[in-house]
Amino acid sequence: MSEALYVLSARGLVKRFDGVTATDNVTLNLKKGARHALIGPNGAGKTTLVNLLTGVLAPSEGSIVLEGSDITRLSVHARARLGLVRTFQINQLFDSLTPAQSLALVVSQQIGLGTKLWQVLGSNKKVVERCEVLLEQFHLTDVMGQPTCEIAYGKRRQLEIAMALACEPRVLLLDEPVAGVPAAERGELLEIVDALPQDVAVLLIEHDMDLVFSFATRMTVLVNGAVLMEGEPDDIANDPRVKSVYLGHGDAASSTILEEARRG
């Protein structure tokens, strides 16, 4: 299928570190509005692949195309400006700012106003309106005026995704969005992930199989740096190789969820 049909297309990505192949000829394609999950046992190479896609690492071989433009050698910031945005396993936030100020800073930069207007949220109507929408969408209005360091961890993850969406991505990479979030705080976060804009392609990297199977319409399984298989969730859940890989890495919980998904 032509790369023109994909919003993001990675072809034959290879990454070697001192002779060790961490990413082995990986191809990954996302259509507009995709809900795609990248899974695999610990050490499968998921983080390396995401770092290649986002520009943290340069590939030894292969190419990455975003909406028809080759971004293989572009920086992280250049890719973000073109619409490839990532959240992190450990959130990257401004602890001393409030959620409203943090969002105003990102929105101000996004619409070309620089970084000064975030200090006074009401100084620009476009900034105010966009921030109000994001605060409501991500269930942050109740904590919008509190320093970020004081709000619950689940809310911090919600803020991080809100800031990523404020960058108006074409492709959003969610790197373990529920990592470290207490069970009592997950429900709201899962609702927010499920309600992300349909025109944004989302690549979810996650160990929580409940979230993976409830969110993704297509999945890629990575093992030892290479693609084991790609397919729809039912195909993944039914595949004996996938279950064997998880069991072989001692990940019984993930294998159990795969089995439950198969039965469902």
Image (cartoon, rainbow, N blue to C red):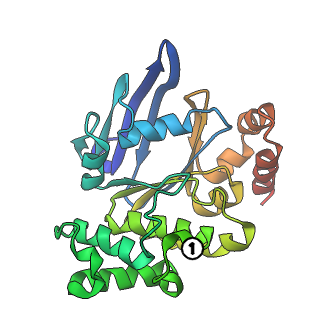
Quarter the C terminus occupies: bottom right
For the question of whether residue 198 can be seen, the reply is: no
Residue 232 x %, y %: 59, 51
Q: Please state which of residues 54 and 91 is positioned toward the viewer in this rendering.
A: 91
- Return the residue found at the far top: 19
- Is 91 on the left-hand or right-hand side of 249? left
Residue 84 x %, y %: 34, 52
**Residue at x 36%, y 23% (from the top left corner):** 61
Residue 1 x %, y %: 36, 41
Give the vertical position of 101 relative to 232 (above or below).
below
- Is 239 on the left-hand or right-hand side of 21? right
Instruction: Classify residue 71 by image quadrant.
Output: top left
Q: Please state which of residues 199 and 188 is positioned toward the viewer in this rendering.
A: 188
Give the vertical position of 100 relative to 257 (above or below).
below
Q: Which residue is mark 1?
A: 150
For the question of whether residue 147 can be seen, the reply is: yes
Question: Which three-letter amino acid code belongs to the residue tagged 1?
Answer: Glu
Give the vertical position of 233 relative to 246 (above or below).
below
**Residue at x 73%, y 45% (from the top left corner):** 238
**Residue at x 62%, y 76% (from the top left corner):** 188
Q: Please state which of residues 21 and 150 is positioned toward the viewer in this rendering.
A: 150
